[in-house]
Image (spheres, grey):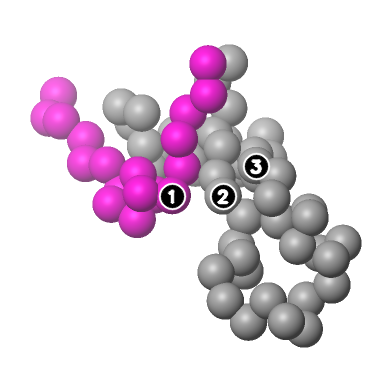
């Protein structure tokens, strides 16, 4: 079997947790914060997790993560 290639964009954005889930940083936090509500920016602080329905696709993109 040849080695599988890891998706370059995915490896920069996702990290695997100890329990095997994929975590990512929520988008929209870098600039133009003035018009975003406090509630919205608070929600962006939390870590996002990939839903179970997408895990199969993500595991193909990140075979060795």
Quadrant of residue 65 within the rendered picture: top left
Name the residue beneath numbered marker 2: 25
Classify 2 as above or below 43. Answer: above
Q: Which residue lies furthest to the top in this view?
A: 19
Q: Quadrant of residue 44?
A: bottom right
Q: Which mark is residue 24?
A: none
Camera-near label (1 vs 3) is 3
Q: Which residue is drawn at 87% across and 62% down?
A: 39
Q: How crowded is mark 3: few (under 14 residues within 10 Å), some or many (20 or more)?
A: few
- Seen from the viewer's position, the closer of residues 57 and 16 is 16
Where are the magenta residues, as a range? 1-18
The residue that label 3 is drawn on is 47
Q: Is mark 3 on a helix, strand or loop?
A: strand
Q: Which of marks 1 and 3 is nearer the N terminus?
A: 1
**Precedes in sequence: disc 1 or disc 2:** 1
**Dot 1 corresponds to which residue?**
13
Q: Are the residues at dot 2 and dot 3 in contact (C-beta closer than 8 Å)?
A: yes
Cα distance in 3D space between marks 1 and 2:
7 Å
Picture residue at 21% right of the left edge, 35% below the top: 4
Q: Give the answer, above or below, for where 38 lies relative to 15.
A: below
Foreground residue among 64 and 4: 64
């Amino acid at each position: 079997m040849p080695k599988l290639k890891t998706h370059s964009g995915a490896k920069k954005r996702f990290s695997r947790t100890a329990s095997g889930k994929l975590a990512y940083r929520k988008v929209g936090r870098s600039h133009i914060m003035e018009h975003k509500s406090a509630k919205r920016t608070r929600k962006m602080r939390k870590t996002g997790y990939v839903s179970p329905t997408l895990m199969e696709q993500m595991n193909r993109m990140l075979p060795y993560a």
